[in-house]
Image: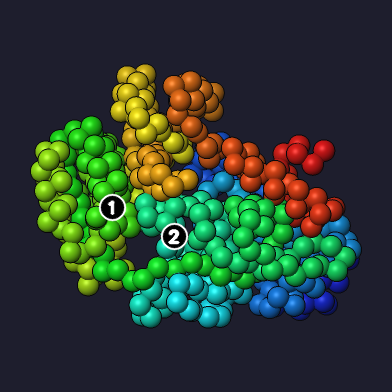
Amino acid sequence: MLVEWKKDMEELVGEKVFLVDEKTRDKLSKDYFWYSPVLDAELKNKVADGVCKPSTEEEVAQILSFAYERRIPITTRGAGTGNYGQAVPLEGGILLDLSQLNTIIEVGEGYADVQCGVKLGRLEKELREKGQELCIYPSTYVKATAGGFFSGGSGGIGSITWGSVWDGNIIEAVIYTLEAKPRRLVVSGEELDAYIHNYGTSGIMTQLKMRTAPKTEWEQVIVQFADMENMLLFTEKLSKDPTIKKRLVSGAEPPISSYFTPLLNYYEEGSSVALLEVEEENLEEIKGLADEFQGSIVHVIDAEAYHKQMGLSDFTWNHTTLWALKYDPELTYLQCGFSNSHYLDQIQNIKNKFPREVFIHVEWMLANGEIRLGSLPIIQYKSKERLYEIIDYLESIGVSVNDPHTFLLPRDKNGYFEKILEKKKINDPLDLLNPGKLSMALK
């Protein structure tokens, strides 16, 4: 039997919008937090009391007003491809699934104006048909939504050239507040800092204008190396070469390279590999650069096959972790940043300290105007205590760690957390938007 507020919600929006069956609630209350054994234990039993699937902004406003009146928590979800429990309702309440807001409103020169539930794979296809393409997108782009990526993600394919979600890749956004009468805000410029990567805590994004780039014909290239150091030096030099246009520069040492089962026929067992997306006219330059570091091109996917079959990006960013988990469920990962000047020393220290526990997977990207080495190393998981011993050691040698084993929105050095917190106090005075994700910050 439905409790009173659920009956009233059903009357307000209808039974097609408000869903309370156990299967739907359980399915949509989860994201990819199971990448982390720590989060899996903490979050697997968290379930919303009901799911709302609005298809218009008007319905969104109705639901938010109702939630404010009844003091019901709201947790927002796109496609649920996030990895940190961003879309998991810690305190029950309403799971607000925005995937039905999926209209591509306008594509113009250098931008795409879309509703938050538009899938990035669909948008990329339409953009490329019109001579443009996404600047950045996650490895889960086929399923991931535009709003979910900018509200819960950070970087991905394209970040080598265009940076992260904070680097001007969102131009404008429509945000709803959670008040008695929800306000519809149109934000741009520095105001966006309070709503990017906010887990839906400071306001709910329903529409966004994204920066786009001119379409490029991308060739995908696998380069094989006998050792990790040459792979790293090759990927660094390629990443910093402004004459070679690129969308992806990724690298993995063994045994990570052995997890990519669909690719194993292309390179020798025990190899370190670089996985690239480069403009098709640059293949000769790539070959020359590979020769310089004793590497060899072992496979090329022609540009006409781009996005028409499994691509190399399906083995990069956090898809690398997915392949690792398929191979061994006892593996997990971290998110790290290395020093530009002495990353080789840092990596060697890590390999010496944890030779059978930490395996190196790198993603080069643009950050604060500088090409930097990011990493999602694969970790042999033994215990939560051991995991944090590894994190403590990495930080002690100057490696930055963004902990993917907590559902708490991380503080940062750029002041974004404080901006999110400031707007949350104004836009969500009852702390009903994804409560619990900002820890003790509101108290």
CA distance for labels 1 and 2: 21 Å
Q: Position of residue 383 (x, y in %)?
A: 50, 27
Q: Amino acid at mark 1?
A: Pro
Residue 93 falls left or right of residue 123: right
Q: Position of residue 94 (x, y in %)?
A: 74, 61
> For the point 30% across and 28% down, which residue is it?
344
Q: In terms of sequence position, does the residue under pointer 1 or pointer 2 come before the other? A: 2
Describe the element under mark 1 as helix, strand or loop.
loop
Q: Which mark is residue 137?
A: 2
Q: Which mark is residue 242?
A: 1
Looking at the image, residue 58 lies above or below residue 212: below
Specify whether residue 383 is in view: no
**Image color mode:** rainbow
Circle 2 packing at 10 Å, graded few (<14), some (14-19), many (20+), is many
What is the quadrant of residue 439 in the picture? top right
Residue 31 falls left or right of residue 427: left
Q: Amino acid at mark 2?
A: Tyr
Disc number lying in front (1 or 2): 1
Specify whether residue 295 is in view: yes
> For the point 26% across and 37% down, which residue is it?
232
Q: Position of residue 215 (x, y in %)?
A: 33, 71
Describe the element under mark 2 as helix, strand or loop.
loop
What is the quadrant of residue 170 in the picture? bottom right
Pick the front one: 290 or 142: 290
Pick the front one: 134 or 31: 134
Circle 1 packing at 10 Å, graded few (<14), some (14-19), many (20+), is few
Q: Which mark is residue 383?
A: none
> For the point 14% across and 45% down, which residue is it?
290
